[in-house]
Structures are given as structure tokens and as C-alpha cells.
Amino acid sequence: MSTPHPNPADLSDPEEILGVILDPARRGELYPYYHRMREIAPIHPTEQFSLERGWFVTSHGAVHAVLRNLRMLSDSRNVDIFDSGPSGAKFFEMMKRLLLYLDRPDHDRIRGLVSRTFTPAAIEKKRPLVQRVVDDLLDEVVDRGRMDLVNDFAYPLPIRVICGMLGLPHEDVAHFMTWAHDFARRGDVAALDDEVIRNGEDASDGFESYFGELISKRRASPDDDLMSALIGLEDERGALTDREIVATCVILLQAGHNTTADLTSMGVRALLIHRDQWDLLRSEPRLITNTVEELIRYDTSVQISQRVGPSDIELDGISIPAGEMCILVNGAANRDPARYPEPDRLDITRSDVGHLGFGLGNYVCLGMSLARCELQTAIGTLARRLPDLELASETAEFRPTLLLRGLESLPLRW
Ligand code: HEM
């Protein structure tokens, strides 16, 4: 039986509030506790997160200031949490090569090259592909009158899109669903067992050999796809190595699937709970662009970013020493009443949404144009093709992780 929810107003010890925020059983009721934390300790020193001392930052002003400070880095030491010894070595080696965990100058070089293939204009050309994937997924369920949005729609969508962009044959997508799932599951280090570690090794092997072969094929015979574009990228320091291309494909698949899937399902749920907003979107489809921005602000999938500085910084009068981790809670910043009037109200006509859901600065989401395109197409098409969509269950089961917030399932009917 779950314990009763403490009233946030009764809590005055920041560590106690943080304990509630970090409790995996409380993912559905996060925001009142973020508010309380921000009221009493917006920049809170803590020893949680296995740190000697880190800073849990919840105000918009402070999160924004750290993200846009280009001297603050996403520490490559973060990757060490994935080291589970020799039996999990292939996964750990792959993680160390992913953009998110690279230090300068490799991070900036690879990011600079890869981002050329993810500009808004390049992604706009992919909109027909995204629409086709969305329509195919809906065609598969439309006659059933019900679906689990997470597993039938939101989860396969970004994987099919990125596989389509990379130029993979449709019949290979099933491997990628399995590998992407097993790789992500292995990344949840709080819940490892032998089987999870073994599956993580198989997924790392699978990615390595599949992408390795595809690189050879496209080198011999380039096509009009993302893999050929990655092979052709070059700057004054040269082209990406094969190892870097493999790691880029893995990060695009991994950073782009749960994040987008979770936002699709949490966003649709929020709209169906606030039925007037769903009805408004149905009657004014042009609101889809702003709707997606508001949904990201309202409840984002990537709740936390981490930064450390090479020297001390001053944050709202508090001195943060060099080398101490700032745990930036994007999700709390996006609901700060000092930045957003009535922050807990979902309002798809809100002006100046300007959320921090894609981060800012050095590490701003490389795939944000693709994420926007997928969310606009997915949610816009659902509203058009299934206008009577409704929740088939009152309750929602959130995944236990906080860093990547999302739903286990979302039963819907129409
Ligand atoms: C709604 C969906 C998404 C959300 C909310 C999201 C959010 C974020 C955030 C907050 C960061 C910055 C992390 C930090 O500050 O340390 C990030 C980084 C990144 N995202 Fe996304 N993302 C989404 C979708 C995507 C997609 C579709 C792709 C690519 C296919 C992608 C690729 C990346 C990559 C490669 C990085 C690392 C950038 C770097 O280290 O320089 N993301 N994302």
C-alpha cells in the first residue's frame, strides 16, 4: 500500500522535500514538491545523487543562467555510473563514445559536423517520412477502437523515423526496436541484473556490427540518406571515423526515442485531461506548433541536466565551487511562476512559451527540430483522425526514473 502524500506546505526541510521528489513511487505528483523546493531552497546543496556535494537547482533564473554559461560542462565522469565490470564492458565502451559524454574538443567537433544534418531546413524535408510513419501506425490500430498509446504508437514512431532517415530496410526495424529497448534498459543502472547486462552487451554488439556493415555499403555506394550524409561530413580536421559514425547513430537512436515517445504520451494525456485544450486544438489545427511547445513546458521528458564548472561561479548570491555538480531541474524551471504566469495551467495559446525542455547552450538538444516535427505530426494527426479519443483509465503508471520521465502505458479508446 502506498504511503499518503505529505502536504507540500507542511514540509520545510529541503532534504525531506528532495526525498519525496526522488521517491520512484511519486512520479505522478512531482510538481507541487518542485514548487515547495523552489520556494524555500531554489539552489539547494545536497549529498544525494552519490555526490560529495551537488546543487539541486529549481528556479528558472538559475537553471537558465547555468545552461547558457558556456564554461559550464556536461562532465564526462558522469559516464562512470555505467561501469558494471567486465561482463558489461561492451555497453560501457559504447557509452563512453556517445556525444553526451565526450569532452572538448571531440564533443564540439563531432557536434558541429552532425548538427549540419539536423538543421530545421534539413528536417523539414523529412516531414513526409514522419507523416507516413504516423499514418502507418494509426492504420494498424484505427479499427480496434482502442490502443495503448505508448507501445502501439509513441514508442515505435521515433525508431521507425530514425531508421527511415538512416536508410535501413523496413524488415530490419524489428532488430532496432529490440536493441534500442535493451540498450535503454541497461542504462537504468538502478535496476541491473545479469540478464539486463547480457542484453545490453548483445545490443551494443548488434549496433556495432550492423552500423559497421552499413557504413561499408554506403561508402561503396552512397545514397540520399542520413548514413551517407554522415559519411560525407568533413571539416578542416577531416571526416568522422567509422567508430564516431557508429556512436553517432547510437546516440541519435537512443537520445531520440524515449524522449520523444515519452513527450508524445505525456502530452496526449495532458490534452485529454484538459479536454477544452484538446477540443480547441481540434477546432484550430494551426495551434499545433504552440501546443507542442506548451506541452514540453508543461511536462517534459528530460527532467534533469548536469553541469560542472572549471572555476567557482556565483548563482543568485550563492557561491558554487569549481568541480561541484549542478543538477539543473529543467522540469521545475519550466513551471517557475516568476517566469510563467499561472505555470500549472495548460494553455495551448500561451504566448512566449520559451521553455528549457531542450536545454540551452553547448549541449542544446541536437535533435530538437526532428522532435518538434515528430510531435507536431503525431499529435496533430491524432487530433484530426481520432477526434473522439479519450483516456481508457483514470490512473497513469509512470516509469520509476526521474531523469527521463515517462509513462509505462496509456490505454486510450475512441
Ligand atoms: C521531445 C523530445 C526530446 C527532448 C525533450 C530532448 C531533450 C534534450 C535535452 C534537454 C538535451 C540537453 C541535455 C543536457 O543539457 O545535458 C538533449 C541533448 C541531446 N539530444 Fe535531445 N531531446 C529530444 C529529442 C531528441 C531527438 C529526436 C534527437 C535525435 C534524433 C535528440 C538528440 C540529442 C542529442 C544527440 C543530444 C546531445 C547533445 C550534445 O551533447 O551536444 N534529442 N536533448
Image (cartoon, rainbow, N blue to C red):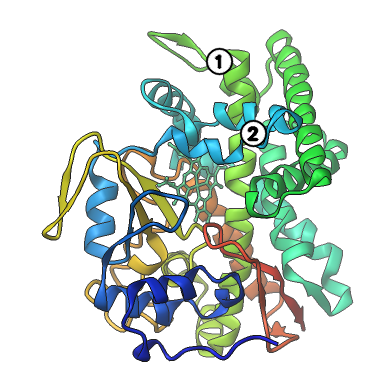
Image position, residue 275 (x, y; %): 56, 88
Residue at 70% in and 54% down? 191
Q: Quadrant of the N terminus?
A: bottom right
Q: Is residue 145 left or right of residue 325?
A: right
Which numbered tag is attached to residue 400? Answer: none
Q: Nearer the viewer, residue 156 or 37?
A: 37
Which numbered tag is attached to residue 250? Answer: 2
Q: Secondary structure at mark 2?
A: helix
Q: Amino acid at mark 1?
A: Gly
Q: Is residue 208 left or right of residue 249?
A: right
Which quadrant of the figure has residue 311? top left
Q: Nearer the viewer, residue 343 or 184?
A: 184
Position of 158 relative to 280 (above/below): above
| Pair 1/2: label in front | 2
Q: Is mark 2 within 8 Å of ligand 1?
A: no
Q: Quadrant of the C terminus?
A: bottom right
Circle 1 sits on which residue? 232
Q: Is residue 226 visible?
A: no
Image position, residue 138 (x, y; %): 78, 65
